[in-house]
Image (tube, rainbow, N blue to C red):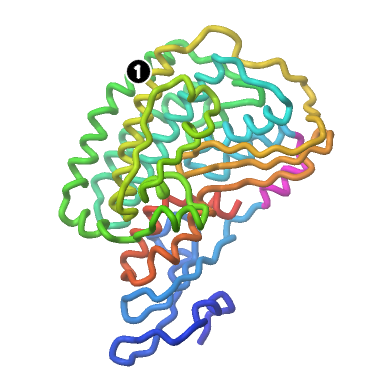
Amino acid sequence: MKPDSYISHLELGEKDETFLDSNELIINMGPQHPATHGVLRVILKLDGEKVLGTECVIGYLHRGVEKIAENRTYTMFNPYVDRMDYVAAVSNGLGYCEAVEKLLNVEAPPRAKYIRVILTELNRITSHQLWLGTHALDIGAITPLFYTFRDREEILKIFEKYCGARLTTHAFRIGGCQYETYEGFEQDVKKFLDFFKPKIDEYEELLTTNRIWVERTKGVGLISGKECIALGVTGPVLRASGVRWDIRKAQPYAAYSDFQFEIPIGQNGDTYDRYLVRMAEMRQSVRIIEQAVGGIPEGPIMAKVPKVLKPPVGEIYHSIEAPKGELGYFIVSDGSTQPYRLRVRPPSFVNLQALDMMVRGQLVADVIAVIGTLDIVLGEVDR
């Protein structure tokens, strides 16, 4: 019996060969499956344990964020973006603030740009730590979850001291930053970096050469760079497939043009390479933060922006390199205090469409590994 119309595309084409002439099986994984991050329903078409096709059913966390933007002023809508990718709220806020600033033809002061970079890169580390801990847990490794959450707590303490929030960290304002750095901010960040550098080595000691980890990740969820580009996949998934594309380098924003850092890439485009790329990215984030915290310029933290924002009539698109890939905002202004139209280009949503290609021919257990390696957050997928 068919679950519903979502499986129709799985039945197109010639009938696949089945093991011992057994019937194909269509089952639901989710929407409350404990090994998926958020509320995602995956319809699997199986031959035994071999995956013949998938269909992702999304929308369980849809809140109409983009429509809400049309009924809020530019300033009032700012906190809403924190609730999309709630694991990387700082990045969401940076992308939105810079998009509106581009629309207003306003540039944040240098000091604000450096503070933005520091907080955004700290947020990238927390996002990758959460990904690593939960991804390892999905595959059966429990210890990395305890290690990553132990270390992630130190960054959350800095966020809390800076703006009072730990998860949905509303750190930025249109035109710069509302809050000046607290006394001892630079020392806290440097202390964390010294504490964290050897911790990355600990993560790798647990997993990189672990026989079970390697067997569960190498050759699983393969996708080529050409296929990633065709599907619009970005972020660590794209770079693990050998494409050296990072918006921080390709189209620098904030103060990233002032810093030296590398773009880690992989060769095979499998789950193992995506793991290695994210581990390397945490090291590069440490490198960026060290440069930024050692050279924060003096000066104001807010540009001169009117209290009531009325951008000129026009439209803009601005994107940043969020922890999961390209996060873009397309805003249309009609000259009023509210966006005429706002559209978000979320990396989790776009990357998720690669799941079907990556799991065909794999085993059911590999579906969990591939969902984990995509690092999706359903708040961003559904919006």
Is residue 363 a member of the stretch shown in magenta? no
Dot 1: few (<14), some (14–19), or many (≥20) neighbours within 10 Å? some
- The residue labelled by disc 1 is 190
Toward which corner of the image does residue 330 lie, by quadrant? top right
At a point 38% along the width and 54% down the height, the residue shown is: 372
- The residue type indicated by label 1 comes to Lys
Query: What residue occupies the far top of the structure in this picture?
Result: 298
At a point 38% along the width and 43% down the height, the residue shown is: 130
Query: What residue occupies the far front of the structure in this picture?
Result: 226
At a point 21% along the width and 36% down the height, the residue shown is: 202
Who is closer to the viewer here, 162 or 371? 371
In the visual, does 364 lie left or right of 167? Answer: left
Who is closer to the viewer here, 161 or 258? 258
164 vs 10: above or below: above
Residue 144, given in percent of the width and then of the height, sits at: 26, 44
Residue 243, given in percent of the width and then of the height, sits at: 40, 46
118 vs 323: above or below: above
In the visual, does 72 lie left or right of 108? Answer: right
At a point 46% along the width and 64% down the height, the residue shown is: 32
Residue 18, given in percent of the width and then of the height, sits at: 34, 86
Total marks drawn? 1
Residue 97, given in percent of the width and then of the height, sits at: 63, 30
92 vs 227: above or below: above
Is residue 69 a member of the stretch shown in magenta? yes
Circle 1 SS class: helix
Who is closer to the viewer here, 134 or 319? 319
- Which region shows up in magenta? 64-73
